[in-house]
Amino acid sequence: MDNKYIITIARQFGSGGREIGEKLSKALGIPFYDKELISMAAKESGIDSEVFENVDEKATNSLLYSLSMGLYSYGNSFSAMGDLPVNDRLYILQHKIIKKLAEQGPCVIVGRCADYVLKERNDVVNIFIHANMDYRKERAINVRGVDKARAEQVINKTDKVRANYYSFYSGQKWGFAQNYNLCIDSSKMTTDQAVNLIVEYLKIKNQ
């Protein structure tokens, strides 16, 4: 299939969104970016990737103050970066990297407010992957190694962190259907079926 779209994937914890995104990128023969964005940001900033990993997709309460003080502007000069918390520095760097990757051509990007970052482009397809709690608990335990007794707590906490991050940096509601082109319940199908569903949707878009 000749795909011309940049695909962003937001996902509930334990829904298998990352796996779907990775398989989709292979099916389409295009690059895949998830944790790779942390490595790229670390390389560009000179900050150890482990530092960024600890704050990835977590918001602070400092960015709005930083914006009001004019400490930096997206896409232009990233001045006074050293004055910002590491969370905000990572977001700014990933914002810049995501835009650069989109300019290079079709790809799959997981998380990091990519749908919001690329909102001005017409060649973006935004997808949200969700699933019921039983499915997510099973995946969290068997795939992610989460303790069975804490699985639901970890899922709810991770989703809350992701929702807060998305809301803080985008001003929009995470998981709200109107923010996405396609919402998929991964508990109702296999990973391969979810990938095929997205591919079929892209074919319709290409018509």
Image (spheres, helix red, strand yellow):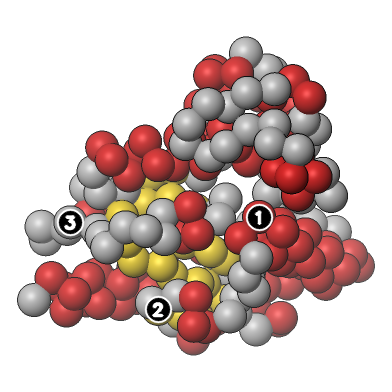
Q: Position of residue 163 (x, y in %)?
A: 71, 66
Q: How far apart are marks 1 and 3 (CA)?
A: 27 Å
- Give the mark, 1 or 3, whose residue is nearer the N terminus: 3
Q: Where is residue 104 in the image (x, y as percent from the top left)?
A: 26, 37
Q: Is residue 36 left or right of residue 107?
A: right
The image quadrant of residue 126 is bottom left
Residue found 78% across the figure and 24% down from its top? 83
Q: Few, some or many C-alpha atoms within 10 Å of disc 3 (few <14, some 14-19, many ≥20)?
A: some
Tally of numbered discs = 3
Disc 1 target residue: 169
Q: Which mark is residue 4?
A: 3
The kind of residue tagged 2 is Leu
Q: Few, some or many C-alpha atoms within 10 Å of disc 1 (few <14, some 14-19, many ≥20)?
A: some
The kind of residue tagged 1 is Tyr
Q: In this view, does 108 lie to the left or right of 18?
A: left
Q: Is mark 1 on a helix, strand or loop?
A: helix
State the residue lying farthest toward the top.
46
Residue found 17% across the figure and 58% down from its top? 3
- Give the mark, 3 or 2, whose residue is nearer the N terminus: 3
Decide which of 64, 179 is in the foreground and name it.
Answer: 64
- Give the mark, 1 or 2, whose residue is nearer the N terminus: 1
Does any portion of residue 188 appear in the rendered image?
A: yes
Residue found 50% across the figure and 59% down from its top? 116
Disc 2 target residue: 182
Q: In this view, does 181 lie to the left or right of 174?
A: left
The image quadrant of residue 172 is bottom right
Q: Is mark 2 on a helix, strand or loop?
A: strand
